[in-house]
Image (spheres, grey):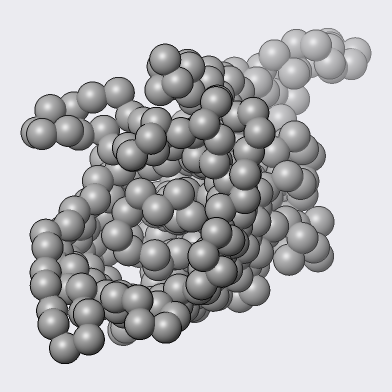
Amino acid sequence: MKANKFTLIFISLFLLCNCHLYGQKIDISLAKNFKLNFTVPDFPAFKILGIEPSNLLKPSTTDIISFITSQVQNSGNFVLPSSYSVEASPLLLFNSSNVTLHDFTKRRMLYSIRISVGTSESEVDSATNLGIGMRVGLINKSDLRSNKQYQNKMFSILETRETFKKKKQEEYSRNLPADTAEIDPIALVTFLNTEMEKYDVKYNNKFDSLKKAYEDILWNKEKVDFAIALLGSSPDSLKKVKAMKYSCWLTGGFPLSTWGEMLLGGSYDYLVSSKNYDLFFNSRIYAGINRAKGFIEVQYNYKKNDLPKKLLLNIGAELSLFSGFWINYYAGIEYTIVNSATTNSFVSHFDLRYDVP
């Protein structure tokens, strides 16, 4: 019942956040229209749930709202997910239609703050786990909203549109009968709207083509994120939630020519019940293009005292099926080291990710 309840909440949020997308016109003065289709990043609230083997928190550009759902496959069959996570920028979520490019650039650090919430059902005792996280983008050279070269090209396209509009207005005036005393403003607006609707098809296509070109230029540029999260658990829905773990991450992404990206990250977990801690050190290398890329990763997990240390080696891929929708899959070998003895096991992870365009 828990999984079904969270499924309905997740689907409702998904539909609510997409209902505003239809029929909108592109306005390049608004920051929301400079968003690119980059991979949906990992959420702190999702990572702290401990669902996946890798603890790397991938940085990315600021999104209004994004979703991740995991564990959609069981014994080769697709099933209802048992874990969900959502991340949103509070300053953009309820005001994205009014945030101008100038305002976003002026307060970039504040707009990069994102809050995430994640939930899953424990496989051990059916308890409900709840993660709450916060992330801030310290550096981001992949964001169009701070890319002057791109903005100049967009303003050039806008100037071309305004020139076309002015020519059509002059054409309307020239074609009026000679005895016309004055221009009918309603008729002029109707004429211009008809002409601009035809032109805006090409205008929007130019806008989209330029954005897609910049996706492949900027996808692997420098990014650094810092994040913190809290994990709670409750045996009865979300009542009497008990703190289980605190975590923090620092991850940087750096370009490898035009074809790849290197991620270097570290994280710290404090386990409340045992008062022990875990340290994770991650390195991941991507190769490909923005919407289709593979990666290899190495993760070392150091545990306090004589607890088992772990080494994870995996390979995977990220693929965008269409704008805003991503799949993420990886598989590998996890080595558990106890004193001088080493054992290994196969691990894998698959999730679906979506962010509102």
Location of residue 169 in the rendering, given as x and y in whole percent from the top left corner = 71, 30
**Which quadrant holds residue 288?**
bottom left
98 shown above or below 100: above
**Which quadrant holds residue 93?**
top right
**Residue at horizontal 48%, vertical 17%?**
5
Q: Please state which of residues 342 and 320 is positioned toward the viewer in this rendering.
A: 342
Q: Is residue 185 visible?
A: yes
Location of residue 172 in the rendering, given as x and y in whole percent from the top left corner = 69, 23
97 shown above or below 148: above
Query: Position of 326 compared to 199: left or right?
Result: left
**Residue at horizontal 32%, vertical 63%?**
54
Q: Please state which of residues 135 and 83 is positioned toward the viewer in this rendering.
A: 83
Q: Please state which of residues 106 and 354 is positioned toward the viewer in this rendering.
A: 354
Query: Position of 3 compared to 195: left or right?
Result: left
Q: Please state which of residues 271 and 178 is positioned toward the viewer in this rendering.
A: 271
**Residue at horizontal 45%, vertical 55%?**
47
Query: Position of 126 compared to 131: left or right?
Result: left
Query: Position of 48 compared to 313: left or right?
Result: right
**Which quadrant holds residue 185?**
top right
Location of residue 250 in the rendering, given as x and y in whole percent from the top left corner = 54, 75
